[in-house]
Amino acid sequence: MKLNATIIAIIITLAFIGAAVASMPGHQAKFAGGGMGGVTFDGTTHAQAGLSCTECHTAIFQMARTAKITMADHNNGTFCFSCHQEGGRAFSATNCIRCHTQ
Ligand code: HEC
Ligand code: HEC
Ligand code: HEC
């Protein structure tokens, strides 16, 4: 476990040093939204909610734009919905327009 934490810390350091610096801290990720309206993930509001990098990276999300989020994910608690679900840490997946804003 200690070793994992060290590796993650190194990855995070490299991410800061690398080209991704422009998006740190408070990175945003924009998703087209599959016809429901675009979704903006805002790293700043999530940091303000008390979340640290390692709570999402890399157990839930890679540090790259790779996630392909489907309708099934909305209901089975993966990606965003590991927190955004009924009884979860954040407002649930049923609040479509809180995410699909554009
Ligand atoms: C609440 C979850 C969450 C937290 C906390 C979080 N991120 Fe992210 N991060 C994401 C998501 C979502 C993406 C986009 C992933 C995708 O599209 O596959 C992302 C993408 C990234 C990327 C790639 C950006 C790009 O444009 O290529 C980097 C680098 C990154 N995060 C670093 C960090 C660092 C450093 C922290 C802590 C300061 C952090 N993240 C905190 C969810 C989070
Ligand atoms: C590790 C847990 C976690 C993950 C993963 C996560 N969120 Fe959140 N999110 C939170 C918390 C906590 C809040 C603040 C409490 C609330 O608003 O219910 C929040 C708030 C938000 C908000 C309201 C604040 C704002 O930025 O407008 C939006 C929108 C949002 N999340 C979208 C997303 C999207 C889209 C993803 C996936 C790309 C995602 N979240 C992934 C925990 C998470
Ligand atoms: C916590 C944020 C969040 C909530 C709440 C949310 N979505 Fe999404 N949704 C996303 C993200 C992020 C994507 C990925 C969009 C992309 O990749 O372009 C997505 C994608 C989708 C897609 C496209 C799926 C695909 O396979 O291409 C549909 C349709 C959709 N959402 C419908 C809904 C509906 C209906 C609701 C309410 C019942 C909802 N969403 C609630 C964040 C959210």
Image (cartoon, grey):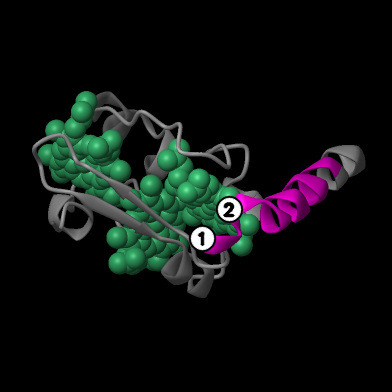
**67 vs 49: above or below:** above
Residue that badge 2 annotates: 20
* Image spot of residue 21 (x, y percent): 61, 60
Residue that badge 1 annotates: 23
Residue kind at label 1, given as amino acid type = Ser
* Image spot of residue 20 (x, y percent): 58, 53
* Image spot of residue 7 (x, y percent): 83, 41
Q: Main secondary structure of the magenta part?
A: helix
Disc 2 packing (10 Å; few <14; some 14–19; many ≥20): some
In the rendered structure, are the residues bearing label 1 and label 2 in contact, judged by CB atoms less than 8 Å apart?
yes
Q: Residue at x 54, y 38 (%)?
A: 60
SS label for mark 2: helix
Q: Which residues are magenta?
A: 7-23
**55 vs 63: above or below:** below
Q: Residue at x 33, y 31 (%)?
A: 69
- Classify mark 1 as within 8 Å of ligand 1 or not, answering yes or no: yes
Quadrant the C terminus occupies = bottom left
The answer to whether 99 appears left or right of 24 in the picture is left
